[in-house]
Amino acid sequence: MSACVPTRTDDPSRKTPKSRKSRKNGKSRQAPTSGEAGASRRFRPSRALLAARFQRPHSPPPTGEGGPRRFRIAGADLTASIAVFLIALPLSLGIALATGAPLQAGLVAAAVGGIVAGRFGGSPLQVSGPAAGLTVVTADLIHQFGWRTTCAITVLAGLAQLGLSALRVARSALAVSPAIVHGMLAGIGATIALAQLRIVLGGTPQSSAIDNVRALPAQLADLQPAALTASALTIAVLLLWPRIPGRAGRVVRRLPAALAAVAGATTFAAVAGLRLPRVDLPSWSNHALPGLPDGPALGILAAVLTITLVGSVESLLSAVAVDKLVAARKEPDVRLPRARLDRELAGQGAANVVSGALGGLPVTGVAVRSAANVSAGGVSRHATMLHGLWIAIAALLLVPVLDLIPLGALAALVMVVGVQMVSITHLRTVKRNRELLVYAVTLASVVVTGVLEGVMIGIAVAVAVALHRLTRTRITVDEQEGVHRVRARGQLTFLAVPRLSRTLGQVPHGTDCVVELDGSFMDHAAYEALHDWQASHLAQGGTVEFTGRAGGRISEPASEAHGCCRPWTPWRNHHCGERPRRTTGHQLASGLSSFQRNTAPLVREELARLAREGQRPSQLFLTCADSRLVTSMITASGPGDLFTVRNVGNLVPLPGAESGDDSVAAAIEYAVDVLEVGSITICGHSGCGAMQALLNGPSGDAQTPLRRWLRHGLPSLDRMRSPHRSWARISGRLPTDAVEQLCLTNVIQQLEHLRSHDAVARRLAEGKLELHGMYFHVGEAQAYLLASSCEHAIDVVFDRVAPAPSALEKSRA
């Protein structure tokens, strides 16, 4: 984002919006002006004026329930729908082949998922259709009950999803541990890959993953060269297509790799005259529709439950991931509402009812196709619905072309998808969060026993691991300079009370003791144990001090009046009760002690590297000296990341200004010329005392150092009061008062001052430096960035910074 300082323009607040111009004579009516005495009314404009000024030019027009609805298809939706269609068409056929269902069933599910789930779902850009996550489940149902009963089970699962949506329990599905979800998907992917490997080698898949592994040696001894050639070509194109370099690569990558691989294998097989099994789409007049469920009631109920749970969880997790992708997308700049998970579950249920009734596969939200829709620029649910329409047209009109596709090519495509479901990113994530055991057990259980059984086993292991961690408490005692320190690491529950009592019993009577509680939970049994021991120890002449992880004093178990204290209260500058009888020094010394004990061991290696290599910060961060601004916290930065300059009011004196301060100019010159930072950020904040002092004006004749320094903020005050300067607004709203208006204006003015420094102007001209404006609202704990397109804009806008997507959402996308 490049920094920008708005050019001198007329004040838009003194003009009516463009939509209010007179249509008769083409002249615009001027809004009434007011003097300086009525300037406060600027901060209370009419609702109509706010709506006109804050309307986003790239946002779709409002379609409220009371207003007219027009069916308009944006060009971005049209191109995105074509891109998703080209990916979904071969994948739908491949998934149908992998399940053993009629190939047309995959096309039916893709069309219904796009049209029905796209229209009624709660995630506008999520693409639904047949998914690899349900392949193993569906294949097992077809083998056990037959195709017509499987269609009926799909209908019943859709009805169950509609019922769950009515109960509004969609968010409950997100309570499943990510390790279980990743393990389930990895197990399904491994099962798919093993089954499709048999077709790639020219054979027929067996009923289970274990049988496929056992039959693999015999299959390797009897290879089918034609099928193997088509499959190998498909895999090669899939893997190499995204890596084609140069301008030619950028052009050809517009065609999805899946379509290019299948089309290449089909063309090669036709030109070479290879004789191998191909797609055989039967006539739609012979298409199988669902029949009455035929089988044991408990078996059918378990099947409905499996499809409902697996499909719902996968769809909801995918919807959450799509929200993160949309929030992180910069182009096109369209604000879309967050996914309504209960409505999304209802949309998936309706799609499954229709798909099963029409003889299609089960439908679920698909992360891969949804990510393609977002990256292709889709702006509404029309992209998803159009993709379903193109699938339906292709299923009706392109049957002769689809019949040319070799089955080995589709099998290879699905096999690669299955292998990719065993994600290394997922594996690293669960390992980093110490969930590797849950992941591995779920994966193996899904492969060996099945999806529902594997997930249940994974849940049981996850619960056991959680209980183990809850009861895993380490309690130690040592003596330092006559003070006994008892450290409890972990959660204090009734299971830890025997060890806690035994350790506390080792503290001699009448001594000074510090009990350090490093945990977030203490049940009543542990509380009573600590309380009783404390009362006994105090009665025998000893002292007791309870501290948290950071070493700060917390409330004692017997003092309910101070229950507001927590281990993090020293950071809050909060104090409860009287100081303990025995102290280790003032607050700064206590913080230093905590740093040496807890933080220093973690950062020592990184600081040693910085000491050897020197500092190489990425940016200069100039902000206010206000104690409430913790730069490392709000920027999530660490040692060596920021070259920070702080002063009263985050001011940048102009070069050669009277009463100037060379320290700021020296820091700018050093950061730009010596450290060669790539960006400079000026950060203002809400409730700035310097800006309040500027608004209040001088309170006396004495020229104090503070008043001389605040002279550098007078240009900001003049800019705000100027009738020829545009208003600054903050994420779709006007500033709440004059102080906030001046805080925002000051950031813009100081950026202008920054450009006046020779070093900055030179690096900007070379294109090696960027300037950023930032505003931090202390009360909201919310950061706002100056919009990159504001340099020539009528309004100056500070945009809200959205939370970043999590590793899970990125990996699923």
Image (cartoon, grey):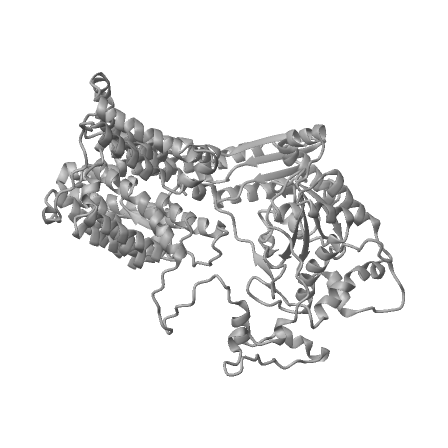
Residue, x 22% and y 16% (percent of image)?
221
User: Looking at the picture, how far across and down is residue 686, in whole percent?
Assistant: 66, 60
Quadrant housing the C terminus: top left
Asked whether residue 651 is in view, the answer is yes
- Front residue of 144/793: it is 793
- Front residue of 584/593: it is 593
Q: Quadrant of residue 181?
A: top left
- Outermost residue on the front side: it is 271
Relative height, residue 778 to residue 233 (above, below) = below
User: Looking at the picture, how far across and down is residue 761, in whole percent?
Assistant: 73, 49
Q: Quadrant of residue 132?
A: top left
Q: So how many labels did they put on this image?
A: 0
User: Looking at the picture, how far across and down is residue 476, in whole percent?
Assistant: 58, 31
Relative height, residue 770 to residue 483 (above, below) = below
- Front residue of 76/453: it is 76
User: Looking at the picture, how far across and down is residue 812, in whole percent?
Assistant: 40, 41
Residue, x 72% and y 57% (percent of image)?
752
- Outermost residue on the right side: it is 702
Relative height, residue 808 to residue 449 (above, below) = below
Residue 70 relative to residue 661: left or right: left
Asked whether residue 625 is in view, the answer is no
Residue 684 relative to residue 335: left or right: right
- Front residue of 88/684: it is 88
Residue, x 40% and y 53% (percent of image)?
378
- Outermost residue on the top side: it is 221
Residue, x 66% and y 65% (percent of image)?
740
